[in-house]
Amino acid sequence: MKYAEIMKFIDQRMKDGYLKPGSKLPSIRALSEEFSCSKNTVIKAYSEMEKKHSIYSVPKSGYYIVENYHSPRKSQLDNRKIDFLSAGPDKLAMPYRDFQHCINQAIELYKEDMFTYSEVQGLYSLRVQLARHLQDIQVFTVPERICVVSGSQQALNIFVSLPFPNGKTNVCLEQPTHVGFIESIKLQNAVAFGIEVTATGIDLQRLEEIFKHNNIKFFYIVSRFHNPTGYSYSNSEKKRIVELAQKYDVYIIEDDYMGDLDLNLKQDPMFAYDTSGRVIFTKSFSKVMLPGLRLGVTVIPEAMRTEFLRAKFAADLHTTVLTQGALEIYLKSGMFHAHIQKMRLIYSKKGLLLQKAYKELLPTSTSFSGSLSGFYSTIELPNQLKAKELIEHLVKENVYVDNTKKMYLPEFEKETIIRLSVSQVEDELISIGIQKIADAIEELIKKRKQGYIQFI
């Protein structure tokens, strides 16, 4: 087929170094003339290459080679690094060029603002765009309740320290949960009560007992694509948790950091079920865009607005104007919507490949969690095998995974669970990596039985 011929030609030019990473590709018109074909044929070729993440398009500009494009020859090496440890977005699918244009426009639009201090709460024009954006995920609010933060972690850290309108002092959180929130709890010496996240979610009766007897000011929960298990709560579970919060006067901090990636458009955030103003919604743009932007958003109850902004001011005065302005343009132009549509397909495919590999390759002595987000899942090892031992063994195989031990409160700590993210793993490497993990588990168990390893 002619479009395949065009793809092969461009790929060879990239291999040979004639087309460099970041460089612009020939125009559709130029290639259609060179190959004596229709423009639609060239468009199909470019579209197929976009799906493989070797090129990307910039509206009204053209097509470009991704900045960190690797020649397929390199990806055919037997001992490739398989990185299940890194949990940032897929580098090959990030909107570098698009966002660069937005930054350039933001410099022009907000050049005077960059020489003065800005609004603590965030640029009002950005908050207007964020209010419109949040409607797409069933979060209906007004710009006055939105605060732009330097990554959602900043908001979470502030909430741990703030007094709450209910006058209570303790915190409830899922176990395990991401290490950033665990560190906030430890550093601020907060009294924390954990509730275990299992393959079927949390024990709602146990949650009610915690709310009832432990002076809980807020419950921190990742409602979709939980870190590290990948668990997503059903709408009925979310409704029940909100009802319990209303019954016992507990606030909920809902971290919906990857809600944009949910393919199930019938799933709603907890915020949508709240009629009492107790659900505080937070989200980040790190996992779906560029982590280095350090941009997040939180929707604050009016009763807490003054105290939150005071703490935000004390932390950093305001979030950087340049990145706020660029995000505003990115949202307003429709680029973010187009980017998310692409991300949903990429990550759901990775998630399917991972779950398939788990089912087919892992030993029956293990169990696994996860969803189709492509970001997080866990493997629980046989009791006689510690995560630390497996991780050290896998490094020798050029496979990297994370130890979840640091994601627990002391009384919940487990040493037999590893976390995986496939967000930055090439599709064809997923099953290879899981096979290496499976082989390592069986090898270490065999050695232990033979008395070669003493497990601590």
Image (tube, rainbow, N blue to C red):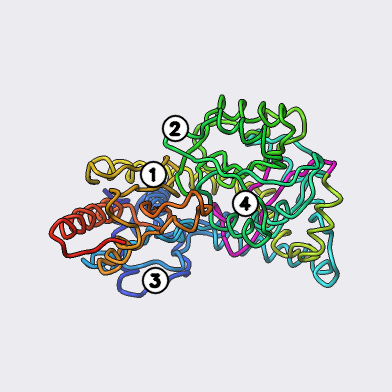
Label 2 – label 3 distance at C-alpha: 50 Å
Residue beneath disc 1: 351
* Residue occupied by mark 2: 200
Please indicate whether residue 51 sits to the left or right of residue 232 in the image.
left
> Which numbered disc, 1 or 3, marks the residue closer to the eye?
1
Q: Could you tell me the amino acid type at mark 2? A: Thr
Please give the range of residues in magenta. Answer: 280-303
The kind of residue tagged 1 is Gly
Measured in 3D between alpha carbons, the distance from the residue under mark 1 to the one under mark 3, in whole angstroms, is 32 Å
Q: Is residue 336 inside the magenta stretch?
A: no
Looking at the image, residue 437 lies above or below residue 195? below
- The secondary element bearing badge 2 is classed as loop
Disc on the earlier residue, 2 or 4: 2
Residue, disc 3: 19
- The x and y percentages for residue 25 are 44, 64
Pointer 4 with pointer 3, Cβ within 8 A: no
Q: CA gap, disc 1 to disc 4?
A: 21 Å
* Lower position in the chain sequence, tag 2 or tag 1: 2
